[in-house]
Amino acid sequence: MRRFVLAAACVGLAVASAGDIEAQSSQQLRARGYIGVGGGLAVPVGDLSDAAKTGWMGQLVGGYTSRGGLLGARIDATYGQNSLKTTGNVKLVGATGNVVVTPGHRPANIHPYFLAGAGLYRVSSTGGTAVTKVALNGGGGVQFHMGHRSDLFVEARFLTIRTDGPTNLIPIIVGFRWGGI
């Protein structure tokens, strides 16, 4: 009888512990919002590379990661500037909404992600007119887990702003993100 009670107690403890571990795992993998900030290079390509030098770009990020982290959505607000090869500069101010796909198992210390989306950008140049046009982008990056729900990210994408003779560039951004999975 004593062995039966001891065995029943061990089984009960194991079942209770498994339930706690499962509850902790589901809490860790529930959907969460996140914010971030980054900055880096704005490398002109195509016709823009004939007129402008490599510039800089700053970025604010806000997003939402689904349960398990595979799918998400994010909004990027950016401001950037490229010096013209003659005199003056080109300024870019815009925002894009993106779908984010993060393959792999969660939680992981390092994981890739892919994003694509559309938005609006205002493009202005010294001595020229400012126009606001539709922008499309797509690319990818890598996140490095730094601690409790914080990540370092490095990403690059192709950004095309549908101006006359499209404004094309490749932003290469390094930043920090807080929240999410």
Image: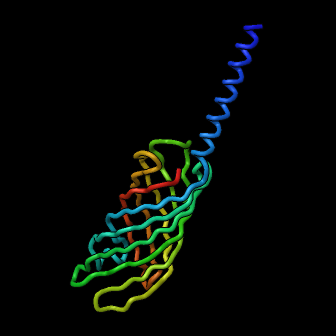
Q: Residue furthest left?
A: 87
Instruction: Please tell me which residue is depicted at 43% across the width and 56% down the height of the picture.
Output: 177
Q: Is residue 71 left or right of residue 58?
A: right
Quadrant position of residue 130: bottom left
The residue positioned 54% from the left and 59% from the top of the image is 33
Residue 23, placed above or below residue 141: above
> Which residue is nearer to you in this view: 172 or 75?
75
Residue 3 higher or lower than 113, as above or below: above
One can see residue 116 in this view: no
Q: Position of residue 42 (x, y in %)?
A: 34, 68
Q: Nearer the viewer, residue 23 or 38?
A: 23
Relative vertical location of residue 43 with respect to residue 17 in this rendering, above or below: below
**What percent of the width, then of the height, locates residue 104?**
55, 44
- Image location (x, y in percent) of residue 152: 39, 52
Measuring 51% from the left and 56% from the top, which residue is drawn there? 114
Give the residue displayed 47% in from the left and 74% down from the top.
95
The N terminus lies in which quarter of the figure? top right
The colouring scheme, among rainbow, by chain, secondary structure or one colour, is rainbow
Any part of residue 32 in sight? yes
Q: How many marks?
A: 0
Q: Position of residue 131 (x, y in %)?
A: 43, 88
Q: Residue furthest right?
A: 1
Left/right of residue 112 with respect to residue 50 in the rendered view: right
